Image (cartoon, rainbow, N blue to C red):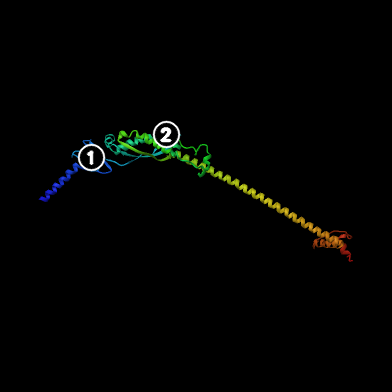
Amino acid sequence: MKGLALAVVAALALVAGSFVLYTVDEAEQAIVVQFGEPMGEVISEPGLKFKLPWQNVRYFDNRLLVWDGDVTQIPTLGREFILVDATARWRISDPLLFLTSVRDEGGARSRLDDIIDSVVRDMVSSTELEEIVRSKDWEVDVEELDDPTLAERDDVNLEQQPQLGRELLESGILERARESMPALGIELQDVRIKRVNYIESVRRQVESRMIAERQSIAERFRSEGRGRSQEVLGNMERELRRIRSEAAREAEEIRGNADAGATRIYGAAFGADPEFYSFFRTLESYRALGENSTLMLRADSDYFRYLERPQIE
């Protein structure tokens, strides 16, 4: 019976302890609430704590919390419609004020949706697209571009630095959004733009423009290639004509030298024995007639004088 009594007492002590004892974690802050109203100060020291049985404890995270906004369609100052996805980091700086203003993290995120989305929309709609997507200190090396024609376009000035840039735009959003945070017991640590993209209709226009630009660049390369091809073919044709001309000139020189040599030999042979030379040349002409050649000549023609009466001296 004594053991049973001890067990009953221990059980009653545990039940009573669950109503009057509570713990606070290192990553939490706590407020004791009585009938919906906060009682006392914020409890930020971790450990075992005491409260009255009819009181409740509200816990608040002491760490950085994440806020992710919805992807929003916003027109820029230049009327380009883009999709903006923003995110923020925040913490509960004043749990008492937080409890009375937004009650819990769900209410806080709802208020952050209204405040940050509104500031992002106002800032983006008053900023040029180039200022949103580029950093202020981003320098463009034109020589390293895949498309060197971008530097020559009138609508693109890559060397001009943005006046605002992505970082300063985000800093402006953070500064404006922070103005409403103290009244909510929230400390806004950071706001970032995670992603910027075109809406579907604008994306198709941009893709069509990119395709047209690439086709223009390809056509320019093809034109340059055709021009280079014609230049190479022209040089080759000119070189071929020069080689043929030099070959023809050398051939004529060789023929001329050969004819001059033959003439010189013929002249020397004629000068040594004119009668024999005349006889030899006449015989060569006989051989050139062929077997079936027919000549109509007078009987006393000089062409047959060596056949009619051979002259032997």
Residue type highlighted by circle 2: Ser
Q: Which residue is mark 1?
A: 57
Residue type highlighted by circle 1: Val
> Seen in the image, is 262 located left or right of residue 81?
right
Q: Which residue lies most toward the left here?
A: 1
Residue 93 is situated, as x and y percent measured from the top left of the image, at 30, 37
Q: Which residue lies most toward the front here?
A: 45
The residue positioned 16% from the left and 45% from the top of the image is 13
Q: Which residue is mark 2?
A: 125
Residue 225, compared with residue 108, is above or below; it is: below
Q: Is residue 120 visible?
A: no
Mark 2 packing: few (<14 Cα in 10 Å), some, or many (20+)?
some
The residue positioned 52% from the left and 40% from the top of the image is 151
Q: Is residue 111 visible?
A: yes
> Seen in the image, is 299 located left or right of residue 239?
right
Asked where in the image residue 63 lies, by quadrant, the reply is: top left
**Quarter of the rendering occupied by the C terminus:** bottom right
Is disc 1 placed on a helix, strand or loop?
Answer: strand
Q: Nearer the viewer, residue 189 or 203?
A: 189
Q: Nearer the viewer, residue 190 or 117?
A: 190
Asked where in the image residue 39 lies, by quadrant, the reply is: top left
Residue 183 is situated, as x and y percent measured from the top left of the image, at 31, 33
